[in-house]
Image (tube, coloured by chain):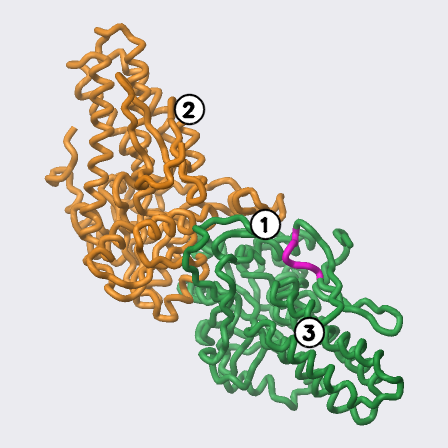
Chain colours: A orange, B green
Amino acid sequence: MNDAGAPLVSVRWRDRGLDGIPELLDQTVLPQTVVYREMPDLATLRQAIIDLVVRGAPAIGIAAAYGLARHCLVAAARLPEASPGEALEPAVAAAIASLGDARPTAVNLRWALTHLRTCFDHHVGLLTARESAARLLLEAKRIHAEDAQCCRQIARHGAALLPRTAGILTICNTGALATGGIGTALGCIRQAHQDGATGTIFACETRPLLQGARLTVFECQRLGLPVALCTDGMAGCLMAQGRVGAVIAGADRIAANGDTANKIGTYQLAVLARHHGLPCYIAAPYSTFDRSLPDGGAITLEERPADEVRGYRGVPAAPADCPVVNPAFDVTPASLITALITERGVIRPPTPAAIAELLADDHPQIPAV
Amino acid sequence: MNDAGAPLVSVRWRDRGLDGIPELLDQTVLPQTVVYREMPDLATLRQAIIDLVVRGAPAIGIAAAYGLARHCLVAAARLPEASPGEALEPAVAAAIASLGDARPTAVNLRWALTHLRTCFDHHVGLLTARESAARLLLEAKRIHAEDAQCCRQIARHGAALLPRTAGILTICNTGALATGGIGTALGCIRQAHQDGATGTIFACETRPLLQGARLTVFECQRLGLPVALCTDGMAGCLMAQGRVGAVIAGADRIAANGDTANKIGTYQLAVLARHHGLPCYIAAPYSTFDRSLPDGGAITLEERPADEVRGYRGVPAAPADCPVVNPAFDVTPASLITALITERGVIRPPTPAAIAELLADDHPQIPAV
């Protein structure tokens, strides 16, 4: 269906009688086409995640959570009504096996699935299969709502750090399209402008898939924010011209020491910011931290298909057979990050101790299963 | 005509009885289509330069020289046979007026036209109009041949500086397609590989017009060189991974102090090289220096149409009406340039005194009118 006028929601759950179905805003055809696609089964959702129909670390996590819930609801409906929760075990395992490795870098995907698995394990002995599936759906909805809340808190923390009149440069898309709420880095920018900031938002187009050009510019324009599109090669020039006051980006995975994996190109923006004496912020929710990894060297970086770089939306640029490097992400060392902005507060500068303290499991905002 | 198998020549003169015509390899449709376009008059050539049918500072200069010669040959043919050289003055003036500002940043364009104007003024009293026009054509051919020779010399000087096994990263296209010979920066890389270098040539795709993807990769593949295409946002990541040993780029204009205007994105490559302790070289002929400008702040930087950034080859990415910044060039300060590589030798480090010395007008390699 065409939803050109609707608010931008990357993932939504459509209730349908006894079950329901997740729908994804197809981000591969934005902004020229605004269309939601139903995700009836695991294979469809897995492929949609691989194909970037949904992208953005938090949004992928939410989509996966709904996908697992949908799969369990369907499975439970096929079981006798009084089947115990344990009967859903194969469905839960199948969902995690199918979705867990659809994309390797964003940790939120596995975080969400693990969270639902823990929830399932916790309740399975006390509920029927249908009740368990219903419980998983509620948990997926809670993850979604919680992400929206995280976004608001991140935005509040981040907006206070951003310049009032100078330009703000960002990369990729970190707004409503990437999350379950108003976004991470773009949420901070949006909040800053709501609070009176006036500087131009420079959106790096973010080759090869142009999430900046296609999604961030689109979101900013719908919100009435003063955005200007630039190529990824213009960032340094804009900084040298004094047109940028801060760099802010999102994250796909943050190691225990603050090293941050994010969209390819983020690392060099951090280097450029440092060279020009500008702050470089990373905005991300709790679920993006992977404290099992001591540093960024341990983060798996996805290498994507060469044709993404050889051309653009099916239009060839380079020779069809040319060798290509296409890492989808790079790692920005904590030493180049001025501050990490989370829903729990600002970690400035990012040190292992400061990260461990803010993210301690006994922190009051940890989601309870 | 289709010349898929022919050697790549950006500009060529086709002799045709008493006159002749310049032809440009249409670089807007490379590498998918290899076709030369005739340039019968000034208006066609001017538009071709604006549209980047021919691009690359030295190649633009050569094209303009042939265009002026062609215009004068045609004008002379319409004059009585014994007309004095002075009768060509309006034709020379018209060519300079038409072509001189077709693109503002590359200085070679005006350098070539000024050179032909000087040649004309020098000979005009002694030759007929037809002889003067023939003399101008010979001078254009000499500029072309001289550029080829410059390229060979630049390549020899530059190859000695480049790493033997580490990767070499470059931007835009600086090869045969950009010059009248084997190229400037890409000529150095080509020579280094001929001399035994083995490292990967990382070609930044060079948005928005993708000269790296379309032209440099194409040239390297035809030459059998080990090229790999990357987006402009990957340069820093590749450096951090230790895959790059040097950065080398061309130039569109070099000020008296060594500040260098080149394709947008060059500046940030120089910053990134500095951050990673890598050398950053600029390779360019004498004709690229503009000693009338004390520093890079005085260089006019062309702002090109917004639609170049909004999409690619007519395929939209960003919303059709979004604001865009699209400087075609940026300025790299001399302080970030390890060495300037010219046909006369290497200026290392680039200082006003070293530049003035190497480029002094009494230098033996100065072209004589």
Q: Nearer the viewer, residue B144 or A293?
A: B144
Residue B317 visible within the image: yes
Left or right relative to A291: residue A171: right
Q: Is residue B309 magenta?
A: no
User: Which chain is indicated by disc 2?
Assistant: A
Task: From the top left corner, tell me how far across and down residue A183 is, in percent.
Answer: 28, 46
Instruction: Evaluate whether label 1 is on the same chain as label 2.
Output: yes
Image height of B320 relative to B18, above or below = above
Which of the two discs, 1 and 2, labels the residue nearer the N terminus? Answer: 2
Rendering quarter of residue B198: bottom right
Q: Find residue A43 and name its label.
A: 2
For the residues labelled 1 and 2, the Cα–Cα distance comes to: 32 Å
Main SS of residues in magenta? loop
Residue picked out by circle 3: B64
Element under label 1?
Answer: loop
Residue for point 29% across, 37% down = A108
Give residue A62's position: percent from left, percent from top.
Answer: 29, 33
Name which residue type carries label 1. Answer: Ala
Q: Label 3: how many residues lie within 10 Å, few (<14), some (14-19) or many (20+)?
A: many
